[in-house]
Amino acid sequence: MTTLTLIGKPDCHLCDVASEIIDAVVAELPDAAAESIEIVEASIADDPALYELWWEKIPVVLIDGELHAHWRLSADRLRAALEEAVTRDASKESK
């Protein structure tokens, strides 16, 4: 399972745009790939540790806990990264 985490806050325009890009990219992936992606949304307003780490960079996108992007999210770059992560996870599970 690949985990994509979107870190943002309420009333954040760029966070809303990032969420829309994530939804669109995942919807375009083959069903098997899309089903192996867990999307988690977290708010810096609810978590002081996240606020401390990311307040000046939201929206932040992590893939399997690793920083993928902040501020602006590219659909093409996200698609490539998710395809790579899903393939990597699938090869680990088959071993």
Image (cartoon, helix red, strand yellow):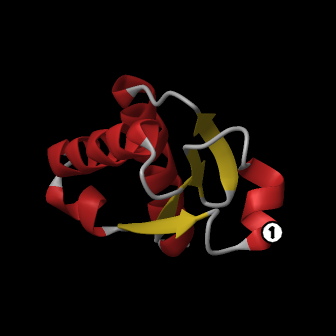
Q: Which of 23 and 88 is in front in this view?
A: 23
Q: Which residue is drawn at 68% across and 38% down?
A: 57
**Residue flagged by tag 1: what amino acid is it?**
Ala
Q: Name the quadrant containing residue 74.
A: top left
Q: How crowded is the residue under tag 1: few (<14 C-alpha within 10 Å), some, or many (20+)? A: few
Looking at the rendered image, the quarter that the C terminus falls into is bottom right
19 is higher (above) or lower (below) than 51:
above
The answer, for residue 66, to whether it is visible in the render is: yes
Q: In this view, does 51 lie to the left or right of 74?
A: right
Q: x and y percent of residue 21 in the render?
A: 30, 39
Identify the image quadrant of residue 52. bottom right
In-front residue for pair 83/51: 51
Q: Please state which of residues 88 and 95 is positioned toward the viewer in this rendering.
A: 88
What percent of the width, then of the height, locates residue 49? 80, 69
Q: Is residue 76 left or right of residue 68?
A: left
Q: Where is residue 7 in the image (x, y as percent from the top left)?
A: 57, 56
In this rendering, does residue 2 appear at all? no
State the count of labels: 1
From what the image shows, is residue 15 above or below residue 88?
Answer: above
Q: In this view, does 40 lie above or below 18?
A: below
Mark 1 secondary-structure assignment: helix
Residue at 44% over, 36% down: 14
Which residue in the structure is indicated by mark 1?
49
66, above or below 79, in the image? below
- Residue at image point 35% right, 45% down: 16
